[in-house]
Amino acid sequence: MRSTVFAAALAVFALSLPANADTVADWRWLNGTTWIVPTTGLPAYVYVPSSNVLTPVQDQTVYQITGYRNGYFWGRTSTKLGSGSITCKSLVGSVTPEGKIYLTFTNYPFTEGTESTVGIGNMTRKLGQWTMANQMSTGTSSVQIGHWAYMVQSYPGTTSWASLPGANMSVPSFMQPCLDAAPTTTP
């Protein structure tokens, strides 16, 4: 009885942990996936130091991973902050065997002197599917943005593909301005 209770507790504990080298050795399946911010993850915050004001805003970010090699991945990103217009970024990231993620988003088209946005996260199983539990912070000395979300995959035929939360447009329409943002690779 005691060993059954221990095994059940261990199984529950293991289900709540991020991915690890023992359970996930290869993240190649990320290639070709599209990730969105679900409704529950839309809230972000904009901070303006000069007025010392923190303002909530919706942040819909979508990225499509267009390549993967040896724990590194890349692709294109579209972001809509509040009622602003869609901005495009190139995505370069890495994922460790344990599922730790490091993301770099660079403005596209690139302009000298602009800062990249850095994000960190973990691949995490939530409700039986992989999510990217990501956090990011970006900005200048005059305005900063902070955001975290359990990003989820979106596919053709799903509700989110047809109408993105916080954007009220389809994923293909949302990504259209940013199709050229994905980096090209050398052999």
Image (cartoon, helix red, strand yellow):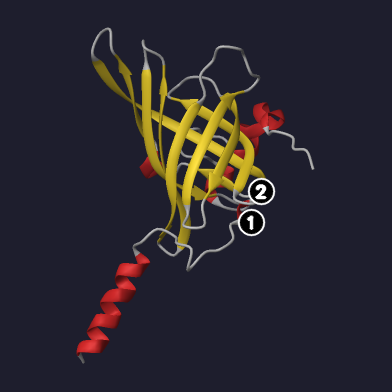
Q: Is label 1 in a helix, a strand or a loop?
A: helix
The image shows residue 178 at horizontal and vertical percentages of: 66, 28
Say which residue appears at 64% left-offset and 56% top-offset: 28
**Is residue 139 visible in this depiction of the protein?**
yes
Q: Is residue 78 left or right of residue 46?
A: right
Which residue ends up furthest to the bottom in the rendered image?
Answer: 1
Graded by Cα atoms within 10 Å as few (under 14), some (14 to 19) or many (20 or more), the crowding at tag 2 reads many
Graded by Cα atoms within 10 Å as few (under 14), some (14 to 19) or many (20 or more), the crowding at tag 1 reads some
Q: Are marks 1 and 2 in contact (CB under 8 Å)?
A: yes
Above or below, 51 against 19 in this view is: above
Which residue ends up furthest to the right in the rendered image?
Answer: 187
Say which residue appears at 47% left-offset and 54% top-offset: 99
Q: Of 91 and 96, which appears nearest the observer?
A: 96
- Name the image quarter holding the C terminus: top right
Say which residue appears at 66% left-offset and 48% top-offset: 68
**Is residue 166 visible in this depiction of the protein?**
no
The image shows residue 58 at horizontal and vertical percentages of: 39, 30
Q: Is label 2 in a helix, a strand or a loop?
A: strand
**Which amino acid is tagged 2?**
Tyr
**Which amino acid is tagged 1?**
Arg
Question: Residue 28 has which mark?
Answer: 1
Above or below, 145 against 34 in this view is: above
- Name the image quarter holding the N terminus: bottom left
Q: Of 19 and 175, which appears nearest the observer?
A: 19
Q: Is residue 93 left or right of residue 48?
A: right
Say which residue appears at 72% left-offset and 29% top-offset: 180
Q: Earlier in the sequence, mark 1 or mark 2?
A: 1
| Residue annotated with mark 2 | 68
The image shows residue 8 at horizontal and vertical percentages of: 29, 80
Q: What whole-number distance in Å separates the C-alpha atoms at marks 1 and 2? A: 6 Å
Q: Of 68 and 38, which appears nearest the observer?
A: 68
